[in-house]
Amino acid sequence: MIKLYTISGKEITERELEEFESARREGILWIDVLDPTEEEIEWLNNSVNFEMPSKQVLGDIEISSKYNEAGNSISINMSFIIQHKDEILAEPVFFFIKERYFVTLHYREIPSLMIFLSRLKARRSFIRFSESLFAEILSIEVDRIGDRLEILGKRIRNIWKQIFVEQSEELIKDIAYYDELNITLRESINEKTRILSRFLKSPLINAQTKREIRILFDDLSTLLDYTSFYMEKIDSIQNSLLGLITIRQNEAVKVFTVLAAIFLPATLIASIYGMNFKHMPEFEWKYGYPFSLFLMFSVTIALLLWVRKKGWL
């Protein structure tokens, strides 16, 4: 699906693909492509010289697959974070900037693009160059990453307090989820800083957009420090949780070990008198049975009192 957005005076208008010629005369501000068909890809190629990257390239991590300049066009492949309750996705978005054309291509709905569209319709102060649109979208995504890290920090602090109260399976799952989220955000930030370092060197970018990008680059560097801190904090929580679980298990093992040791003498006495030898004097003794019971009971009580005195139980 392709959507065209034009600017005429103070109006931002959404146009259909069939209205491309009239939209081009008005001035196409943005071409947004969602899960395109082969026919739509061919149309993009013929209309704006857009070269469709393969899905394999969209998933590559090499900088050559993330940023490319060819003539007067810039192609950027950048991941945007989509967070669900039980799933964290780094969804690729492909940007194509060529003179007055600005194209975004993606296969899922991207929250940052949706926010950008609502801002686009509300104000136009940043609309001067096609690369300015890219800077605005990136600014929204950086803000969203910062918000996620702020929430992540609060959740980590809450978990740090909670592990001393309980060590449940759900708590372990939460820690694993936050660890994955932090790593995904860190990878996304690293990717963006690598791309922006190339973007800032481009002679095709105007000075105003470069100033905006430098601010975003500094923000990303600061956010990267937060991910490093949260990574260390999560590791500390995991080590503390493991230590608490080990202590709890050791306590249980100690109780069973002490109980086994307490009842071991009684078991030994019962085993001795349970042997089927022919000549055992106690078998003929009138008080042999109560004596053996008394012996087992007294030894057990004595060991139990001794263990309690030592503080082992």
Image: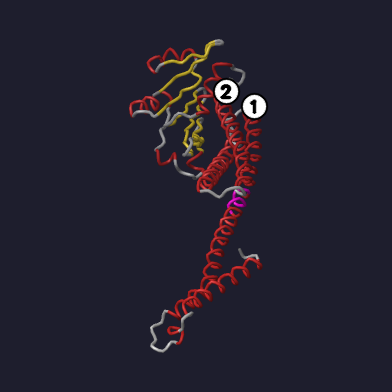
Marks 2 and 1, Cα distance to the nearest angstrom?
10 Å
Q: Which residue is mark 2?
A: 129
Element assignment for label 2: loop
Along the line of sight, the residue nearer the viewer: 228 or 197: 228
Query: For the magenta stretch, what is the residue range?
Result: 233-238
For the point 59% across and 57% down, which residue is it? 243
Residue 256: percent from left, percent from top: 52, 65
The residue wearing badge 1 is 208
Q: Is residue 66 above or below residue 26?
A: below
Q: Residue at x 47, y 39 (%)?
A: 86
Whether residue 42 sits left or right of residue 190 in the image: it is left
Most prominent secondary structure in the magenta stretch? helix
- The foreground one among 45 and 226 is 226
Name the kind of residue labelled 1 in the image: Gln
Farthest residue, direction bottom: 279
Q: Residue at x 66, y 37 (%)?
A: 218
Residue 311 in magenta?
Answer: no
- Asked if marks 2 and 1 touch (Cβ < 8 Å), the reply is yes
The residue shown at (61%, 54%) is 240
